[in-house]
Every structure is written in structure tokens, then in C-alpha cells.
Amino acid sequence: MKILLKNKDINEALKKVSNLGFVPTMGCLHRGHEYLIKQSKRKCNQTLVSIFINPTQFNNKKDYLSYPKNLNKDLNILKKLKVNFVYIPNKKEIYSLKRKKAIILKNENKVLCAKFRKGHFEGVIDVMDRLTNIIKPNKIFMGEKDYQQLLLVKKFIEKKYETKIISCKTVRDKNKLALSSRNQLLNKKDLIKAGKIAKDLFHFKIFLKNKKKIKNLLQQKMELFKKNFDIKIDYLEIRKKNNLKSSSTIKNSKIFIAYFINKVRLIDNF
Ligand code: AMP
């Protein structure tokens, strides 16, 4: 496994590589990341994983500084998975060149996390543009766990590059809670709570099948969650799978949630 720190090392290391799979991460790896890496290994000749906590996608400095890190554990996981390359750039390496054209989200895209985390997706798209330009992968593997991110990045990257974005299912623990690096910031009680919320939303999705006026049902669910779990909810909405437009049925749609447990912000979709 080759560890690359500089962009110039990437050019050298990837000279003879064809059909490269790329898995971008912010580290603190878990089985969700591992699943993406396994998909890349199945579909590509070689796999590169990046570990970079991207400052520009955090709309809150405290959140950026407290983002969990565990580089040694990450490197052990990547070695075990027989990843070919790990790219661990610093901020300067990624951001030394100034962008020619600012990334601007269309108003129609300013929903869900784009509405609640100002500048977040602009930061995500910026770093994905830079990483894709440096690495030039054939395929990038991304998780449905961050569904809005997946759609926005796919649209941008596939328009600008020949790279294909491959979406991968969300990996969950036995309580149905989506694995996330941020789960590390929760205590045991809050993890159980988050699991209960995930399980509830799974059943809720089934319950919504064939229901027409779901707006009231969503509102009731929101009130119930606030009361039973003592959480702050940014949004609980149903939107179309393909374009995230508002939907009044669960058909071809997904439930999206973002909420805080003890100041830790979790997102999921079902
Ligand atoms: P992150 O390190 O949180 O920025 O995530 C890196 C990639 O892993 C993104 O494409 C995420 O969508 C994906 N990912 C995160 N959690 C999961 C999960 N539980 N299942 C599948 N993919 C995930």
C-alpha cells in the first residue's frame, strides 16, 4: 500500500494505472467506507482512498475541529483491505490553486442540508472537483447515506469529467442505525436512541405506502420524535429520489432526516 502526501507523487504513482477506483473519505473509517472500498476493488483494477477532512465544507468551526480522527486505525483497515494507494494531502496541497469559477448552487437545489448548512455543498463540490482533477479516476464510489451529496457531486463531476460516480448502498448496524464517523461522538444511550429513530423511520416508510396525504403524518411524526427522543430536528421530509423535489407520496421518493442528539448532527434517508 503506497501512502501519497503530495499531488506530484500522485502523477508518478498513477502513471501506469488503468481503470482506477477512487473512494474519497474524511477518515475515521467504518464498515460503510469498507463497503465502498470493496465495491471499488471489485469493479476497478486498482483502488485509491483519500483521507482529507475538508475544511471548506464545514459551516461551523467547532464542528470541523471536533470531527473524529484516527489515522493509525484507518491505515490498518486500508492495509487489511489491500488498498493500493492512500492519499493524505494537507490543506495547502488541495487549496493552493485559486478557483477560476466560483461554485454556486442553484436555488432549486437549496433544500434539505443545503438549506440548513450554508456553503456546505459548495465546499463538497469544490473539493471533489479538485480531487478528481488531481487523481483522474475512472470511477468514484460514494455512499447513498449522503444522498443529496451523491446527487449534486454526480451531476457536477459527470458533466465536467469522464469519471463515473458509482452509488453504493448505506451500511447499517444491527439496530438499523447508519454507520457514520460522527456516531463516535455519541454515548451508548444516544446510540440506542439514534437506532430507535432509524428503526421507526423504516417502519414509517412501509406505513406510508399507498397513503396520499402524507404531510400531516410527517408533521405528527416530527412532533412525536421531538417529544419521545428529546432531539432537535432540522428536517424530516419526503422528496423525489431522482431530483429531490418535494413529494406528496412515498412512491419513487425517500424520507430524509437531519437531527441533533446532544449537539451531534446526524443525517439519514430511507
Ligand atoms: P465521509 O468520510 O463521512 O465523508 O464519507 C465518505 C464516503 O463514505 C461518502 O461517499 C459517504 O456517503 C460514504 N459513507 C458514509 N457512511 C456510509 C455508510 N454507512 N454506508 C455507506 N457509505 C457510507
Image (tube, grey):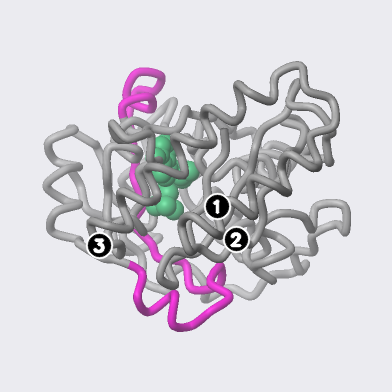
Closer to viewer: mark 3 or mark 1: 1
Residue designated by label 3: 187
**Label 2 secondary element:** strand
Q: Which mark is residue 248?
A: none
250 with respect to 22 (left or right): right
Disc 2 within 8 angstroms of ligand 1 (CB): no
> Residue reaching furthest bottom?
61
Q: Total number of numbered labels?
A: 3
Residue 119 position in % (x across, y down): 67, 70
State which mark lies toward you, 2 or 1. 1
Q: Is residue 24 visible?
A: no
User: Callout 2, which amino acid?
Assistant: Ile
Question: Horizontally, is 202 left or right of 41 in the view?
Answer: right
Residue closest to the far right: 107
Q: Nearer the viewer, residue 174 or 161?
A: 174
- C-alpha distance separating marks 2 and 1: 9 Å
Residue at image coords 38%, 27%:
40
Disc sitting over residue 233 in the figure: 2
Q: Is residue 234 visible?
A: yes
The answer to which of 234 and 204 lies nearer the viewer is 204
How far across and how far down the image is residue 118, in percent? 69, 71
State the residue at coordinates (64%, 33%).
162
- Please tell me whether residue 40 is drawn above or below residue 90 in the rendered image: above
**Which region is colored magenta?**
38-67
